[in-house]
Image: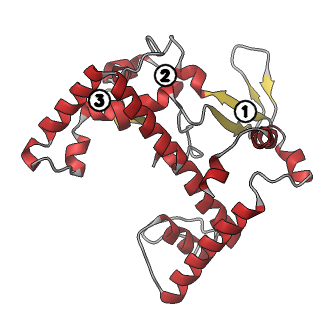
């Protein structure tokens, strides 16, 4: 199933891009993105898990449990919301599949590329190893959440947390990944215009409903934002370098309320 979901090549790749480029027409001719075999597999797995948990009153602190709460009550325990909307079983299936699709292959791919670059850049690898050894010295080599959060260079290489400060107030929280800058699994961010939008300083207007393709990988390799963009360099994400460029010059997960769930 995993290989069938992510093995997009040949005619399957053409169908995938056709679905993205012509969504309304694809829906009219009932073109499927995934085979009936994949759909049946996920319907069976998710459906049986939901039934088991509801029948046995098995509450867990995970993503599926939150979806079950939204299905039954329209809200998640512990979260305040004035708007309650119950999810249908089909909507739960779709969200669960998206969770798998966004977080499986993308995460392993990013880690693989990061390890590959560390293998080719021994200076960076040694610097990272020294930081890890120093930060875990007081914990006998054991990793804790607190020690990982203190590893600044590790954050720049793998999963950096950075703030852009205006008058010492953190106004934008960005999650950076140098490996994802160079090898972003989602090279293009797809959106749809919800209203007519006139592009500033031009005569062009994007009509409402138009599909928008944002060239994320193009910005990741733009010398205007990253010096020597074809060189693996975690220092692209120091506080000083981050402050030099626009926040949206790095979009491996998209941005806004529709950003990729895989970043979590």
The quadrant in which residue 203 appears is top right
Q: For the residues marked 1 and 3, what is the alpha-carbon distance in whole angstroms?
A: 35 Å
Q: Dots 2 and 1: beta carbons under 8 Å?
A: no
Point out residue 90 in the picture as x, y percentages from the top left corner. 70, 68
Determine if residue 21 is in view: yes
Name the residue at 49% across, 64% down: 63
Determine if residue 177 is in view: no
The numbered mark, 1 or 3, whose residue comes first in the sequence reads 3
Q: Name the residue under label 3.
A: 168
Q: Is residue 7 above or below residue 83?
A: above
Point out residue 89 in the picture as x, y percentages from the top left corner. 67, 72
Q: In which quarter of the image is the N terminus?
A: bottom right
Q: Is mark 3 on a helix, strand or loop?
A: loop
Nearest to the eye among marks 1 and 3: give it.
1
Marker disc for residue 76: none
Foreground: 95 or 203?
Answer: 95
Q: Mark 2 points at which residue?
A: 246
Q: Is mark 1 on a helix, strand or loop?
A: strand
Nearest to the eye among marks 2 and 1: give it.
1
Foreground: 231 or 164?
Answer: 231
Q: Name the residue under label 1.
A: 212
Name the residue at 53% across, 34% down: 252
Q: In this view, does 32 lie to the left or right of 239?
A: right
Name the residue at 32% across, 26% down: 167
The quadrant in which residue 124 appears is top left
Q: In this view, does 129 lie to the left or right of 17?
A: left
């Amino acid at each position: 199933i995993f290989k069938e979901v992510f093995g997009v090549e040949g005619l399957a790749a053409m169908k995938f891009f056709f679905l993205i480029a012509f969504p309304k027409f694809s829906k009219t001719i009932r073109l499927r993105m995934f085979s009936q075999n994949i759909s049946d597999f996920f319907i069976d797995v998710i459906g049986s898990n939901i039934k088991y948990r509801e029948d046995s009153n098995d509450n867990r602190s995970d993503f599926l449990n939150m979806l079950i709460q939204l299905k039954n009550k329209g809200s998640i325990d512990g979260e305040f919301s004035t708007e309650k909307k119950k999810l249908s079983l089909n909507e739960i299936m779709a969200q669960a599949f998206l969770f798998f699709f966004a977080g499986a292959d993308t995460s392993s791919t990013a880690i693989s590329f990061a390890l590959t670059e560390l293998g080719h850049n021994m200076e960076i690898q040694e610097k990272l190893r020294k930081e890890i050894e120093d930060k875990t010295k007081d914990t006998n080599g054991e990793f804790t959440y607190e020690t990982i959060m203190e590893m600044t260079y590790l954050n720049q290489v793998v999963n950096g947390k950075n703030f852009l400060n205006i008058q010492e107030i953190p106004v934008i929280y960005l999650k950076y990944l140098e490996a994802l800058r160079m090898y972003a699994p989602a090279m293009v961010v797809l959106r749809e215009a919800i209203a007519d939008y006139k592009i500033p300083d031009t005569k062009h207007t994007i009509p409402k409903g138009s599909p928008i393709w944002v060239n994320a990988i193009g910005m990741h390799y733009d010398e205007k934002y990253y010096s020597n963009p074809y060189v693996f360099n975690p220092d692209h994400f120091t506080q000083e370098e981050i402050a030099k460029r626009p926040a949206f010059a790095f979009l491996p997960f998209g941005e806004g309320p529709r950003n990729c769930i895989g970043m979590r």
